[in-house]
Image (spheres, rainbow, N blue to C red):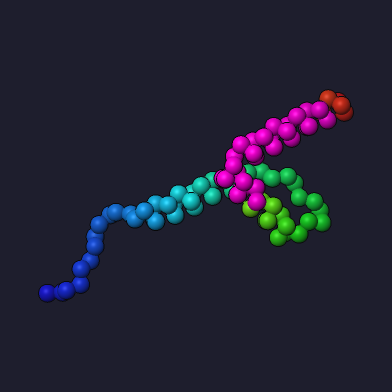
Amino acid sequence: NDSVSLCNCNQRSILDIIWSCLVTLSLCTWAAVHPDVPGRDEKDWKILTRRLKTVWWTIMSPEVVFAQAIQEFWIARKLFTKYK
């Protein structure tokens, strides 16, 4: 008789569920966020830092990112009609 007890249960802990949700949310946000085109002289770490900040703000406060997108849209529209 082995005294080792093996758990063959298919249950996930709360930590497992939270961790998988955070990873999924982060990866989906990373794929969905399209930051501005980096400058020619911008370093890779600066580009990565800017993208990570954008992902952070998208997760924490999506309405701020949405408001910024609306503002950029109106600026682009104004420039388009000006230089049409």
Residue found at x 28% / y 54%: 10
Q: Could you say which is closer to the camera, residue 21 or residue 62? A: 62
Residue found at x 69% / y 45%: 35
Q: Is residue 70 above or below residue 26?
A: above
Q: Is residue 29 above or below residue 47?
A: above
In the rendered structure, the answer to whether residue 66 lies left or right of residue 42 reads left
Q: Could you say which is closer to the camera, residue 50 or residue 28? A: 50
In the rendered structure, the answer to whether residue 32 lies left or right of residue 76 reads left
* Residue 45 seen in the figure: yes
**Residue 76: x, y in percent?**
78, 32
Tell me which corner region of the image, top left, top right, bottom left or bottom right, holds residue 16.
bottom left
**Residue 40: x, y in percent?**
81, 53
**Residue 7: x, y in percent?**
24, 62
Q: Quadrant of the N terminus?
A: bottom left
Q: Is 77 contained in the magenta span?
A: yes
Tell me which corner region of the image, top left, top right, bottom left or bottom right, holds residue 42.
bottom right
Q: Could you say which is closer to the camera, residue 83 or residue 57? A: 57
In the rendered structure, the answer to whether residue 65 lies left or right of residue 81 reads left
Span highlighted in magenta in the image: 53-79
Q: Quadrant of the C terminus?
A: top right
* Residue 31 seen in the figure: no
